[in-house]
Each structure stands twice: as structure tokens, then as C-alpha cells.
Image (cartoon, helix red, strand yellow):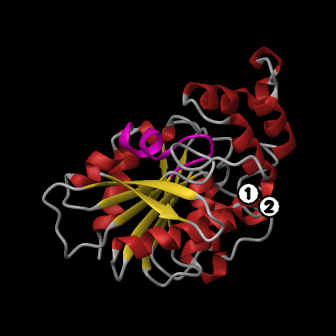
Amino acid sequence: MTGELRTHDGLTLRYWSWSRDPDDALPPVVLLHGFAAHARLNWEGPGVVEALVARGRRVYALDARGHGESDRPHDDTHYGESLMARDVRLLIDRTGADHVHVAGYSMGAVVAVLAAAQDTRISRLVVGGIGAGAVEVGGLDTRAMPPELVSAALTADDAADVPERARGFRLLADASGADRHALAAQIRAVHRDALPLDRITVPTMVLAGESDPLAVRPRVLADAIRGAELVMVPGDHLTAVRDPGFAGSLTRFFAED
């Protein structure tokens, strides 16, 4: 099932929902995808949605502004994870639930942290694909992914001219049919301020790939969130979410009291 949300600044966002014999006593799960991906690519393809639905969960996933089937303006003022966190609160409104569990990956993990620091309806949190950078530079690790380099890679006329360091995001954008100029606007507006990690008081899991250059030293992040659990799975930034241990760890954590 799909639906639409209208944002405070006039954008139309697409969201997806899945369920099969849901247990309505359980909070819905909201999934937030990573940069240059979209909801179905990040969560349905790797089997995370199916793992949750099979356990009686209602699942919602938003195509973030600039991604997937949501509006994709090219103006930087429409972007940034703080605006995306505001969009997440609209989606939680749409679920009608008093409490939800939220999982975010990469960009979506930063959005999830910002949302959880503000919205008391988020009662359990998983952040994947980020590590020490979330503590030391305030979001995605721009030391490993310089925004200016990624923006140039996305807007280059010829993919062959893209530096190796940023090629993965260009290839992902091309493979997913993304609007590369919308993605460039988002990466230029990437969150750079300190994240309010001290305001995260709900049970939290940090879930990172062992070979992920954008999630190095995830223990630093786990230690910065009160009581957070750290789980490592095989894989890098693009493959960790496809490891069976990723979906297994996420669904196990969301099944706990």
C-alpha cells in the first residue's frame, strides 16, 4: 500500500506500508532509508520488511524528500536531515499510533536520531550505517564522504570522471534512477551540527557493518547514547543491510519489551 504526505514547505512525499495478519498490540515500525537509495531499495529488497511483517508488525517506510517517488526539488533550502525529521513526525501522525519503533540507515539514521530526540512517540530506536562520525562531526562522516566531492560526483556529465572515493554513490544513484541534482542538493545541506545524542533516552541499537568506512568505530556512538547496544554484521556501507544478521538483529531488538 502507498500513500502521500504534504510537508510544511509544500512538497509531496510518498510512503509505503506493509502488513500481514498484524498484531495491533505491537507498535508500528517506521523505516528511514539511506542517501541515494529509497524505501523499497533499502528495506524491501534486502528482506527487512518481510522479516518484520512475518512477525506481525505493521511497517511504514518513507521515500525521503529528493529520493524515490517523493518530490525532488533542486534547491538546497528544501533539504537537510532536520527537515527530514520533521517529515518523519508527519508519517508518525499518519500511523495514528501512540508509540512507534524507528530504524534508520546512514542518512536515515541521522534523521532517526533527530526525530527521536524530539518525538516521545518513538519508543525504540535502531541506527545503522553510522559510527564515530555521528559523535565527532555531527552526522554522516564527512571525513570519509566530503559533501563537495560527492556533489561534484553526482553532477558530473560523465561517470568516468568521478573519483573512486565517490564512485559508489554515483553508481547507486544511476542504478536506482535517482535525480542526481536533487541528491547533490541534499548532500550540500547535510547535517553538520552536533547531534542531540544525550537526549536519546529510549532503548537503542547501533547496527554497523564490520567493513563500513562510513561507520568506523561504532562503539564511540554506542557509548554516547545511554544504554545503547552495539551489533556488528559483515559487510560495507552498501552490503551490510543485506546480511541476514542485519534483519535478524533489527527484528529481535524490536521484539523486546
Question: Which range of residues does the magenta coloring cover?
Answer: 33-45
> Residue 39: within the magenta?
yes
What residue is drawn where x is 45% and y is 38%? 41
Residue 54 versus residue 152 in the image, above or below = below
Towards the viewer: 96 or 245: 96
Q: Which mark is residue 137?
A: 2
Residue 113 versus residue 242 in the image, above or below = below
Q: CA distance from mark 2 to mark 1?
A: 5 Å
| Residue 169 placement (x, y as % from top left) | 67, 33
Towards the viewer: 144 or 36: 36
What residue is drawn where x is 74% and y is 38%? 181
Towards the viewer: 4 or 230: 4
Tally of numbered discs: 2
Q: Could you tell me if the residues under marks 2 and 1 are in contact, i.e. CB atoms within 8 Å?
A: yes
Q: Secondary structure at mark 2?
A: loop
For mark 1, what is the residue?
133
Q: Amino acid at mark 2?
A: Val
242 sits to left or right of 21: right
- Which quadrant holds residue 9? bottom right
What residue is drawn where x is 68% and y is 68%? 82
Q: Is residue 194 visible in this depiction of the protein?
A: yes
| Residue 74 placement (x, y as % from top left) | 75, 46
Q: Amino acid at mark 1?
A: Gly
Q: Which mark is residue 74?
A: none
Label 2, residues with CA under 10 Å away: few <14, some 14-19, many ≥20: some
Q: Quadrant of the C terminus?
A: bottom left
